[in-house]
Every structure is written in structure tokens, then in C-alpha cells.
Amino acid sequence: MRFLLVIGMILGFFTVPVFAQSSQIQFLTVMTDNNHYDEGDTIVISGQVETVIINTPLILQIFFDGNLVDIVQFFPAPDGKYSHTLIAEKPLWKNPGEYLVRVSYDEEIEETTITYTPKQENPETINTFEVQIPTGGTFDLPYFMLGGEIKDVIFDPNNFTLFIQIESPNEGTVSFKIPRESLDAKKSSGQDETFIILIDGIQIPYNEIESNSQFRFITINFEEDDSEIEIRGTFAGLGTSQPVAGELLSLDSSALVIGGLSGMIWMIPAVTGFVGAGIYLVKFRTNKD
């Protein structure tokens, strides 16, 4: 009994009390409201300092590839919290990739990283495409394009259509100066009819900027990754003059095609509801010499 008591006293003598250690409080923190930003986005940088030091500002620095992009100073709130906003835009923000966000206060420094993607510059093209006429010869199609590139233009006079193959890495616009003697859209009264414009098979509206006796100027908006523009009219020229014309009654999926006596073609669509073989109402107008 005495032996056990002695052992218990010895163990109690060498036992060291263990106290729970409090977690270390970080003197300075920094965070952003997102991990990735595109050009024009607002970046919110926030955090907190443990102890506010009078007349001591926070210093915010943005680096890209080791080069200083932006720097600004501001004071934390009395409770130690801070928040600052930046706009990711040119000319300071111009390179894609990872950016370092560094905040320093007194002798403390904290960092975080974000990624950034600038808008791609829309290529601007003013040019003239030489369009091949299937029966021989060519005609010029002047155009202005912003945001893409014209790869090819195919003329189908039998369907009164221009098929324009484009490459569009971004959304943009394209304007065409269409020569009336090559492609046009007319009503039976001789007044201008609207073209039918399709992009990748979907009909869209367009703007007609100007027209005169020789040309029609139209502008078409396209979206990123669009690939084909169709411009459909009611008249296609094959390189000569004095066309024979038919009156456009209504646009349908089926149409009669009348060969012009002097090398021109006009489209006579089927009356709505009648497709293929049958009786069609056709009104002719012949040019006089």
C-alpha cells in the first residue's frame, strides 16, 4: 500500500499541466470576389488588418509577369476592414494570363492571384471580292467587315443567291455594296424589295444603309462562330442587260425559273399553298427596246 502511494506521488510530481493553445490570428488578409475576370469587369479586393495603425495606409499593387500594372493607397476602416475596386480595362490591363495581387500594411505583405482575359481585337477589313459567274465572267463585290473574315463567295444565279463563307472569331458586322446588275430584289411595280438574309440557315433582319440606281448598300450583324451568310434576291444578272421580268407574288419553297431572253433571270415563286407541279399565276413584264 505504501509502495503504491509513493509511485502515485512521484507520478503526480512529474505531471505537467497542458493548456489549449489559441489559434494564431493573421495580421493581414487579402481576397478577391472572383478568380477570373474579363476585360471591363470590376475587381473587388478586400480583407482585414488585425491592428489599425494611425496614418498608415494599405498599399495595393497589381503585377503581371513581374511588371507593375497598377498601384494605389487607401486606409482601412476603424474596425480594420478594407475594400477597394478596380476596373480591368486597357491600357493597364492588356495581356491575358495570371496577375499577382499584393497588399502590404506596415511591414506585413499578403498576396493572391487572379486570371484575366482581354477582349480580342476585331479585325477591320475593307476590300473587294471578285465573284465568279457560273456562265463566265466575274463581278466585283465591295465590302467592309468588322470582327471576321470573308473566306469565299459563291454566286448561284439560278436561285438568285450569294453564299458568303465567313470566319467569325467574334461577333461583328459586314456591309456589302451589291451591284444591281448582278443581284437585286424587285417588286412587280419596279420598286425595291427587301432581300432575304440568312445566317447558317436562320433568317435575320438587316439594315439597308443607302441605295442608288447602280448599287444597294446593306449591313448585316453576325455572331461569334457564324459561318455562312446567304443573300437572296429576285433577280440575277449574267453579264448582259434588258431582262425579262416576272412579278413576285409570294415567297415559297418552290419557284419557277424563267430564262431571260437576253441573259437575265427572274424568280417567279409558287403561289402559297401550291408546290411543285400545278397551275401558277405568272404576270410578265417585258422591257422594250
Image (cartoon, grey):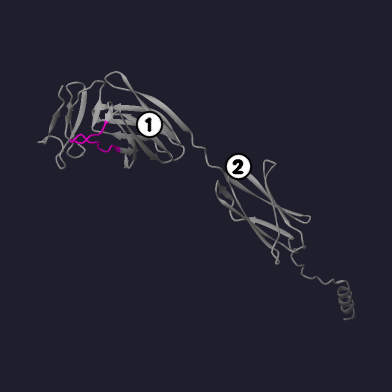
Give 279 or 248, whichever is nearer the viewer. 248
Specify the amino acid type for callout 1.
Gln
- Screen quadrant of the C terminus: top left
Residue 244, x across and y down, in percent: 17, 26
Query: Seen from this angle, which residue lies furthest bottom?
Result: 1
Residue that mark 2 sits on: 91
Q: Main secondary structure of the magenta part?
A: loop
Give 25 or 270, whichever is nearer the viewer. 270
Q: Callout 1 environment at 10 Å: few (<14), some (14 to 19), or many (20+)? A: some
**Residue at image x 28%, y 18%?**
136
Give 135 or 285, whichever is nearer the viewer. 285
Q: Give above or below for 76 relative to 64.
A: below
Quadrant of residue 158 within the rendered picture: top left
Query: Seen from this angle, which residue lies furthest top?
Result: 136
Bounds of the magenta segment: 184-196
Residue that mark 1 sits on: 165
